[in-house]
Amino acid sequence: MSWQNFVLALVLLCLWGFQEVAQACTCLPVHPQQVFCKADVVVIKAKVVGVTPGMHVEGTLTKYDIKQRKNFKGTEKLFDAIYTAPGSAACGVTLTKGTEYLLMGRLQSDGSLRISVCDFYQPWKALSAVQKSLLYRYEKGCDCMIKSCFSFPCCKTTPTECLWTFLPGKMGYDEQAQNFACIKKNDVCFWYRAAFIPRRG
């Protein structure tokens, strides 16, 4: 192989690598309440009872058969399945059969439910009593705006904002995501911490 051909092959390989990276799934940090409040999001507690894997080549979605236990938000329809892309690079999620989850999935035009890594899903047992109680508070703050704060200066620009801080020395973003809801009272939004209560079923 000539020197010129070697360089050309190396460039093409690099470009292919960059394309693969560009096609990988990326999501900005999103507070669970932000996902909850989106108009097309359905929030349910459900147990995974089966799985039908999708295929990358054919673009088939992975189907998780579920047994719905509770509906926190959205249509009153009982779902028996939730769909996701077949692989993390395409923003697909991996759920474990036999595990109960809190699922925040997007309702599709055909009535099916779909979820991605940019949405919110957690094993039910991994949620604290505080997080479970917040599910009954999130809707009271859907008129508020949760503003992510990554660098100084960072301050509220309107009374209807709650700052979600990722800054050293401030309340950790995990603490706010797990234990606080942004709610509105008297036209002002603020972080509300739920009281500790016994776990709900």
Image (cartoon, helix red, strand yellow):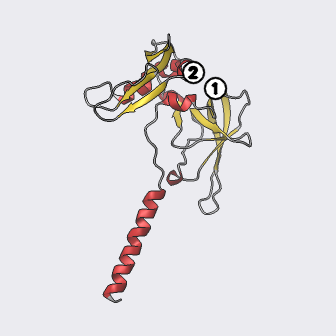
| Foreground residue among 147 and 89 | 147
Q: Residue furthest bottom?
A: 2
**Structural distance between the alpha carbons of marks 2 and 1:** 9 Å
Where does residue 59 sit, x and y in percent of width and height?
A: 63, 58
Where does residue 187 sit, x and y in percent of width and height?
A: 50, 14
Q: Is residue 166 left or right of residue 98?
A: left
- The amino acid type found where label 1 is placed reads Lys
Residue at screen point 31% across, 86% down: 3
> Based on the displayed image, in which of its 4 quarters is residue 66 positioned?
top right
Residue at the spot of label 2: 139
- The amino acid type found where label 2 is placed reads Glu
Q: Quadrant of the N terminus?
A: bottom left
Residue at screen point 43% across, 22% down: 158
Residue at the spot of label 1: 73
Chain-order first, disc 2 or disc 1: 1
Residue at screen point 33% across, 80% down: 7
Q: Quadrant of the C terminus?
A: top right
CB of mark 2 within 8 Å of CB of mark 1?
Answer: yes
| Foreground residue among 168 and 102 | 168
Q: Is residue 32 left or right of residue 81?
A: left
Position above or below: 129 against 99: above
Residue at screen point 49% across, 30% down: 32
Where does residue 72 sit, x and y in percent of width and height?
A: 62, 24
> Based on the displayed image, in which of its 4 quarters is residue 164 positioned?
top left
Secondary structure under tag 1 reads strand
Q: Residues within 10 Å of mark 2 (few under 14, many from 20)?
A: some
Where does residue 155 sit, x and y in percent of width and height?
A: 34, 26
| Foreground residue among 41 and 131 | 41
